[in-house]
Image (tube, rainbow, N blue to C red):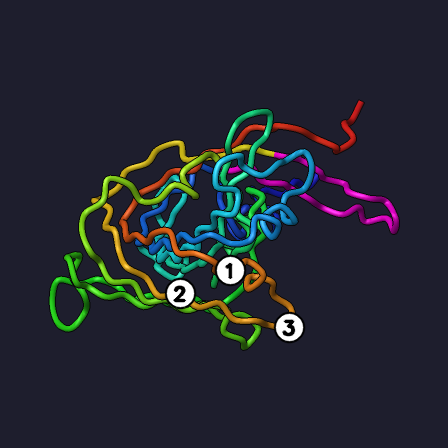
């Protein structure tokens, strides 16, 4: 009997074509984080049951740009950079479940298929987009990680610009922000193949970093704009009040999550 292998489709006799390898997944990246307050009702409408808004500062949002290099356990992707490098931009809010505060990604765009597949496995609502941000460098005209350095960031999808930002580093910071600082509470959803069959997969999951390291965080001043688009809703999280902005270089390991609740029928 023929067997097929691979952590994720496409599954083949060797498994070599699988879009993503099994965890752990390792990430090195440069992050620009801009926090602001929106109408708490706009956050609440993005929280399905049984999630509730965070009691403290329920309208807080973090919009994050990230320039990543990533790999599986073998690290082989780092020497084949097209399989390692990608960029993403995502909006994070906070919520609560059974008295515990969680972060939750409510919108996210990436520019590579393997990053999209990893996110769908984790419960991130990833879509394809065009993401760019200024990279630091110790030589030439690129900014250094020092006070006064300026970085730009843009996000577009479906030929429409959705967000743009400019941040200027001000001073070292003890934190990189509070909105995206909790374990993630995400849903993994998959509709049944049968019409009217509901959800074949319906799970609320918790996940976070299995390991984390980071360079110094920099507090920054930020200018952020959001734009309307026909089939995107990031702009509904309108900017009402700036909170803070940060720049930080990080290393993260993701190695699975934990099931919090499930509406998926279990096999007997």
| Magenta range | 184-204
Q: What element carries label 2?
A: strand
**Which of the marked residues, 1 or 3, is nearer the chain's N terminus?**
1
Q: Nearer the viewer, residue 252 or 229?
A: 229
Counting other residues with Cα less than 10 Å from the Cα at mark 2, is it few (<14), some (14-19), or many (20 or more)? some
Q: Position of residue 69 (x, y in %)?
A: 34, 53
Q: Quadrant of residue 232?
A: bottom right
Label of residue 230 in the image: 3
Are discs 2 and 3 less than 8 Å apart at CB? no
Q: Is residue 186 one of those drawn in magenta? A: yes
| Quadrant placement of the C terminus | top right
Q: Identify which residue is drawn at 76% across, 47% down.
A: 191
Q: Which residue lies furthest to the left in this view?
A: 139
- Residue hosting label 1: 109
Which residue lies at the image location 59% right of the left edge and 72% below the top edge? 229
Q: Is the magenta stretch mostly helix, strand or loop?
A: strand
Mark-to-mark CA distance, 2 and 3: 20 Å
Tell which tag, 1 or 2, sits nearer the viewer: 2
Whole-percent x and y of residue 228?
57, 71
Decide: is 48 above or below 10.
above
Q: First in sequence, mark 1 or 2: give its number.
A: 1
| Image-based side of 139 in relation to 9, left or right | left
Q: In which image quadrant can residue 266 be found? A: top right
Disc 1 to disc 3, how far (Cα)? Answer: 16 Å
Residue at numbered disc 2: 224
- Secondary element under disc 1, as helix, strand or loop, is strand
Q: Which residue is drawn at 40% across and 31% down?
A: 210
Which sits in the foreground, 75 or 156? 156
């Amino acid at each position: 009997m023929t067997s097929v292998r691979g952590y994720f489709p496409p599954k083949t006799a060797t498994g070599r074509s699988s879009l993503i390898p099994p965890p752990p997944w390792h990430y090195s990246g440069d992050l620009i984080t801009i926090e602001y307050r929106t109408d708490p009702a706009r956050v609440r409408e993005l929280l399905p049951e049984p999630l509730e808004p965070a009691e403290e500062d329920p309208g807080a949002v973090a919009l994050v740009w990230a320039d990543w290099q990533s790999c599986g356990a073998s690290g082989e992707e780092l020497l084949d950079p097209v399989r390692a490098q990608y960029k993403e931009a995502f909006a994070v809010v906070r919520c609560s479940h059974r008295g515990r505060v969680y972060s939750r990604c409510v919108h996210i765009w990436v520019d590579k298929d393997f990053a999209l597949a990893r996110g769908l496995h984790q419960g991130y609502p990833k879509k394809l987009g065009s993401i760019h941000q200024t990279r630091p460098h110790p030589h030439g005209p690129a900014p250094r990680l020092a006070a006064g350095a300026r970085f730009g960031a843009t996000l577009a999808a479906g030929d429409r610009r959705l967000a743009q930002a400019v941040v200027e580093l001000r001073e070292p910071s003890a934190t990189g922000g509070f909105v995206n600082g909790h374990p993630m509470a995400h849903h993994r959803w998959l509709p049944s193949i049968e019409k009217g069959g509901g959800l074949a997969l319906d799970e609320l999951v918790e996940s976070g970093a299995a390991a984390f390291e980071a360079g110094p965080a920099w507090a920054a001043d930020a200018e952020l704009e959001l734009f309307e688009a026909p089939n995107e809703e990031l702009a509904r999280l309108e900017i009402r009040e700036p909170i803070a902005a940060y720049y930080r270089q990080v290393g993260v390991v993701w190695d699975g999550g934990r099931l919090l609740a499930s509406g998926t029928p279990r096999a007997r």
